[in-house]
Amino acid sequence: MSLAAKLPWTHRFAGGFPGLSSQPLPTDADAVDYLTRMAAADGAGVEVSVAVAVDAFVRDLKATPGLFDAIKASCILCGARTITGALVPLAGDAPTSNGFVSGDYSRTNGITGDGSSYLDSNYAYPTVLQNDCHVAAWVSGLPTSGVLAGYGDIIGSGTLISLAACRMYNNGGDTFLPSNTTASGLRAASRSDSSSFVYRRNETNETATIASTSVTHLDLAVFARQRHTLTPDNITDAAIGFYSIGTDIGSAGLAALDTAVTNLITAIGEAL
């Protein structure tokens, strides 16, 4: 990799050295805004190669109509120089970290859970989104137990995704068990109607014919399931490199998100 690619993307020679070389820089307005906020949190901009990977990721999302706008709360939990930068939101409000420290963070793999630390996404689905929602998490390190993201109210109903199970606005007795429970990568679910939802794992979609029910709306936790007591349970030790919460993205959107995040994680790994 060239020296210029390793410079902070904000460096005056980030686009290349005069008379010697040139290289692309991020230009998408939303990517630049995110990278600028990340640089402020980190104290320095990420390398050009990382910034360009983020720019390409945002462009990939926007290439599928409605996908970028459907993301209401999200963090790229890798790539940033520090865990503080990793918790800068791509969309929505910043999450609240509960227990994570700098040693839990890897620039290439994301944040690794310890079975007791979690993020409060500070996002709760509005009531009108009972049948218009998605939640996704990129698993870069397999857990031994726990929930990747979710919430549940006093009777155990709500939304959650894990490697072994998923439910979206259902009571605890209506949980979908996917056919694959061991692969890393994107785990995600999206609902567009009251009768079923689509779950994504191992680069494949499966349909769960489970009706939605009205539940208490709580902030979704990441690395855990938020409870009505505001004391999360099922806290995981997974490593997570990205999460997204928002409105329905459909089967095609799940596949497109999977591809976009895969390309992002791969590009960041190659850059660093």
Image: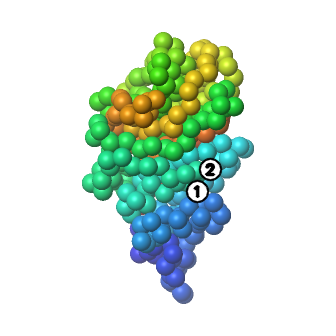
Q: Is residue 159 above or below residue 221?
A: above
The residue depicted at 56 percent of the width and 61 percent of the height is 34
Where disc 1 sits, the SS reads: helix
At label 2, counting other C-alpha atoms closer than 10 Å, the crowd grade (few under 14, some 14-19, many 20 or more) is some
Place of residue 17 in the rendered image (x, y in percent of width and height, measured from the top left): 50, 83
Does 123 sit above or below residue 46? Answer: above
Residue at x 66% of width, y 42% of height: 70
Q: Quadrant of residue 222?
A: top left
Decide if residue 254 is in sight here. Answer: no
| Identity of the residue drawn at 52% across and 34% down | 218
Q: Which residue is mark 2?
A: 60
- Mark 1: which amino acid? Ala
Q: Vertical placement of 43 versus 85: above or below?
A: below
Q: Is residue 145 left or right of residue 193?
A: left
The residue that disc 1 covers is: 56
- Residue 37 rendering spot, x and y as whole percentages: 52, 65
Rendered residue at 65%/31% (across/down): 127
Q: Is residue 179 visible?
A: yes
**Cβ atoms at labels 1 and 2 below 8 Å apart:** yes
Give the percent coordinates (x, y) of residue 27. 63, 67
Q: Quadrant of residue 180?
A: top left
Q: Amino acid at mark 2?
A: Asp
Could you say whether the residue bearing mark 2 is in a helix, strand or loop? helix
